[in-house]
Image (cartoon, rainbow, N blue to C red):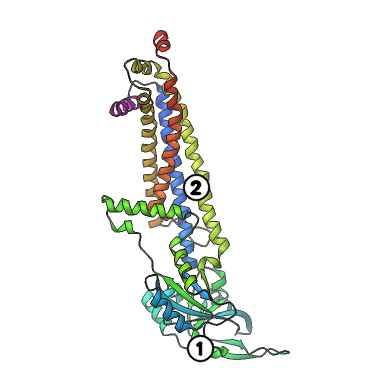
Amino acid sequence: MNFLSTYLAWRYLWFKGKDKNIAFMIKICFLGILIGTFSLMLTLIITNGFEKVIHEKMQGINSQVIVSSQGNRLEYNGIRNLLLTEFKQDIQAVSARAIKQALIDHNKKQSVIFLEGIDTQNESEVTTLPEKIIYPKNLNKNTATKLILNMAENELLIGHKTAELYNLHVGDEVNLMIPEPASKHKLFFNKHTFVIGGIFKIGLDEYDNNIAFCNINHMNKLFNENGVDQITVKLHIHEKKYLKHSMLSSDFWIEFWTEIKFKIKNFFTTNPEEAAIIKKLQKRLPHLQINSWKDLYPALVSSLKLEKYVMFFILALISLVASMNMISLLFMQIQQKRRDIAIFKAMGMSDNCIRSIFLHLGIGITLSASAIGLGIAALAGYLLEKYPFIELPDVYYVSYLPARMEPEIFFVVFIATMLLGFLATWIPSRRSKQIEIAQVLRQE
């Protein structure tokens, strides 16, 4: 009977002699679901791209995890050894930072700048600072990393906007006014000369215009202090397990479904693996503050996440509207096929079997339309990801329209579309049960 229902649904869908109004409605339903699926998928690809790219930019210059102690300095070497020893499966690299304020003085211009001391031996393993250096020109990643590794004690890395403001170039000298320990009545400064070792461009004003990096050991000497303000941590990036298998293998789908269940369980957590590691660190080091880089930008992270979910639910309404057309189509189809249904019933076909004819009809239209819509969205997403040709104004954190495709997004959109399609098909298909055999055969 199942095969018969599928065959009859196929015949109703492709029968050349069918009513022109029905044929037109089928095309409208098909295009509506296709466009709805395409727009929903492409929007999620773009919003996911915005979230991923901005996260990479923010997290790149910061570290994934920040260990600090409010108002206290940290003993760097001891904590670093503990983290790398006890959490070697979770932690990839550890570095340190110290943050102070100083006055930059050059060509009769002065302004306050945040001076960040970095562990030059490990900074490149924790953040993407080497990749942000634009001067000296034509540096690749290796040479930029060596530039930071070999930073002299009197060398300084400054943002490109600070360099433009003071007309500074690599090799120029600049004075920093370091405050002495505060007294009750006066504030004294010591002048120290630094050489510009490099100029970076992050794309964020708070770094490009307000921050300079120097060697943390030299900075501690200048301020006559020991220890560090922050210990920065980079976590191991665990590759998604299903990507290691072929899509044709059962292992791929087992691991893929495990990933989906994990994400559903942690639906409201931006990065559940990172959150789990932070909890373990907090349990091991309860006297220290351990935060994610997201805690530095809570409003931005929340807005990106909210935007993605809101856009999903709003654009899902397009698919819902297209599904409403499916209800109209099937009601018209059932009304037109009343005589066929009565004959089928008279021949002994069950109500469930007759209902499944129209279920197969609606689900077939939904399945084919959503599959083609997802395919077109995948092609558009690939082009946007491979060739970022749409430029954005400076108000955004990125200069081009980003796109990031993930299998989980395709799965969610496909399931959502099929559920809406099934609901829109199931409602009218129940009407076939109400057709009276005797009345229809007598009248028609």
Where residue 338 sits, quadrant-wise, is: top left
User: Is 412 left or right of 112, judged from the image as shown?
Assistant: left
User: Is 59 left or right of 165, judged from the image as shown?
Assistant: left
Q: Amino acid under label 2?
A: Phe
Residue 403: where, in percent of width, then height?
Answer: 43, 55
The residue depicted at 43 percent of the width and 17 percent of the height is 435
Identify the residue position indicated by label 1 in the image. 218
Q: Considering depth in this image, is 203 or 389 the residue closer to the camera?
A: 203
SS at mark 2 in the image? helix
Q: Amino acid under label 1?
A: His
Residue 32: where, in percent of width, then height?
Answer: 45, 36
Where residue 242 sits, quadrant-wise, is: bottom left
The rendered magenta stretch, by its main secondary structure, is classed as helix
The extreme top residue here reads 442
Q: Considering depth in this image, is 106 or 18 the residue closer to the camera?
A: 18
Residue 38: where, in percent of width, then height?
Answer: 43, 44
Is 82 rendered above or below residue 426? below
Residue 127 seen from this side: no
Magenta-drawn segment: 1-14
Identify the residue position indicated by label 2 in the image. 312
